Every structure is written in structure tokens, then in C-alpha cells.
Image (tube, rainbow, N blue to C red):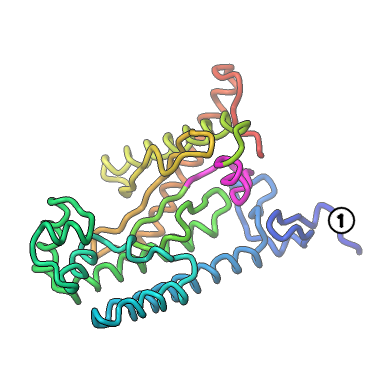
Amino acid sequence: MPETNASRKNCPICSQDLPLAEFGVCRARKDGRNLYCKGCIRKKVTNSRRALKEYRSARKRYVSQPVIEQTTAIAAVQEAAAGYPRLLSRLSPVERVREAIRKGARTQKEIAQETRLGKDEIGEALANLLLLGKEGFQTLIGHAVEMEEILRELIISRPELTILNEENYGPVTLFRAYPTGVDTFRVKQQERSDPAFVGQLRAYNDFNRRIFERVHHEALAGRGVAIGFTESYRHSDYGEPIVALKSYVLSPYVDENRMQSIITHVLEAHRAVEAEMAGSAKKGKTTSTGWDSP
């Protein structure tokens, strides 16, 4: 029996019409399947892992080089870790201070000139270096990056979520949530560059604020996880702020289950906010839901 249109689905990334079996299960969507095919999601995860591996390898070579070889090492980092041409500027305050001392900085003024950090940041960095030592600090940073990598893979697998700082690997992940059915691969470009999209951008900003408020409320009540929120991850080309949910690992005891818990609580809040918005629209409290798919 030939396949019908109902047994196939189009993936907006690869633009292929594929059997439904090629799409993962997603109970939040009407058709019960993910927006993107399994192959495209696997490719995204593979590329993310490869980029992180290259970054770690290049960075390890850099920090282990003597000072007199750092110019060559920096060039190697930039060549091996595509997408990270400003690696040094993305080092943590502790790493910057350590590198400044290695280069010969001895006074607070010299360290400040080399690192461009404030007095308080320099003091905290020196305290951490004294307390943990180089290897201890590197271990903590490595654990934090590893946990964020796990979180990013979980985010990539969800059609409602998307990473904003995907080219900046570290202990912080910025991400956004969108209503069910929104193409999260294309909407980011529209938000950044299309002035006609400003109304939708504001609606999605509010959607993320309400998700954060619910997650934060549960965390304060001792029933959830702590995540952050920024009112201006960046501005669009037409001057509108773009908000973001934020995850940052601070504890060495955070594990993979904790990362999964973040996704679980964000999705619970996502469903609650969507239901709340739908209920308000039915009651006539709003003139527009703002959830039209781009």
C-alpha cells in the first residue's frame, strides 16, 4: 500500500518529506512528532560535540605552553578551534589573572591593564587561585563545561527550545523557549534582523519571562531548580532587546540528572504558560495571542 501524506512529514531543516518514523516522539505537538527529523538533530549534536572537542584541545595546548611560545600557541588555537578567534577574551577572570601573572604582571595595576578586570574581580580571582590552585580550578571549570555540554544536547533535542550562545562554549548557556510549532531554527534570524517582526519578538520575550517566573517561583518554594534570566542577551538590528533564560553551573556536585531536571522544569513551565495564554485568548482578555508561526 503506498504511503499517504498523513504518514509523511516535511523537515524544515533539510526540506525533505520523510516517513513519520524519521521524527522523534513529541507529545506537546499536535501530530505527536518532533518538528525536525532525527537525522538533522543528530547532525546538530555531532557538530556541537566536534566543536567543543576542538575547542578543548586547542585551549589545553595554549594554557600548557611557556610564555615565550604563546604567540604561536594562540595562532594554533585560532586555527584548530574555528569560531573562537577571540579565545583569550573569553577566559574566566581567574584564567586571565593567572595568564597576566605568568607574563610578568606583579601589581594590581599591571594585572588590571593586562586583564581589563576591576579591582573586585581581580581580588576574587587571586583568592580562588590561592584556595584551589591551578589544577583544582581547572577541574571545576572542566566539570562545569561538561555539564553545560550535556544541557545543550538536551536543549537541541527539544523542538520548543534553542541555544543562543551556541558558538561560545563555557559554563554558561543562554537559551530561549518558543510556543509549540514555532521553527526555532529560523525564528532567531527573524528576531534579529526583521523590523516587521518586532511584535512577535516582544510576545516571545514575554513568553520567556513568564516561563522564568514560574521556574523561579518553584525554586524558591524548594520544588525546582535555579536558573537565571537576562533582559538583554543582545539587541536586534532594529534596537529591540532579546531576553534569554540562563543556566550556569556553580557547584562541583551538579550531575547529569540535575541538567535533565532543568529541562523538565522549563518544559513544565512552558506547558503551563501556553495553557494560560490559550485560556486568556478564549476569554477575550487579549486581542491577539502573538503565537502565529513565522
Q: Alpha-carbon neighbours of circle 1 within 10 Å: few (<14), some, or many (≥20)? A: few
Q: Which residue is mark 1?
A: 4
User: Farthest residue toward the right?
Assistant: 1
Mark 1 secondary-structure assignment: loop
The quadrant where residue 19 appears:
bottom right
What is the three-letter code of the residue carrying label 1? Answer: Thr
Q: Is residue 263 left or right of residue 111?
A: right
Q: Residue at x 55, y 26 (%)?
A: 279
Check the picture and name the quadrant holding the N terminus. bottom right
Residue 26 screen position, x and y as percent? 60, 53
Q: Residue at x 67, y 45 (%)?
A: 30
Residue 134 screen position, x and y as percent? 18, 74
Q: Camera-side residue: 264 or 140?
A: 140
Q: Is residue 190 left or right of residue 161?
A: right
Residue 92 screen position, x and y as percent? 26, 61
The quadrant where residue 292 appears:
top right
Q: Is residue 276 above or below residue 233?
A: above
The quadrant where residue 15 appears:
bottom right
Q: Is residue 212 above or below residue 109?
A: above
Range of magenta residues: 176-192
Q: Residue at x 31, y 45 (%)?
A: 223
Check the picture and name the quadrant holding the C terminus. top right
Residue 191 lies in magenta, yes or no? yes
Residue 128 lies in magenta, yes or no? no
Q: Camera-side residue: 210 or 129?
A: 129
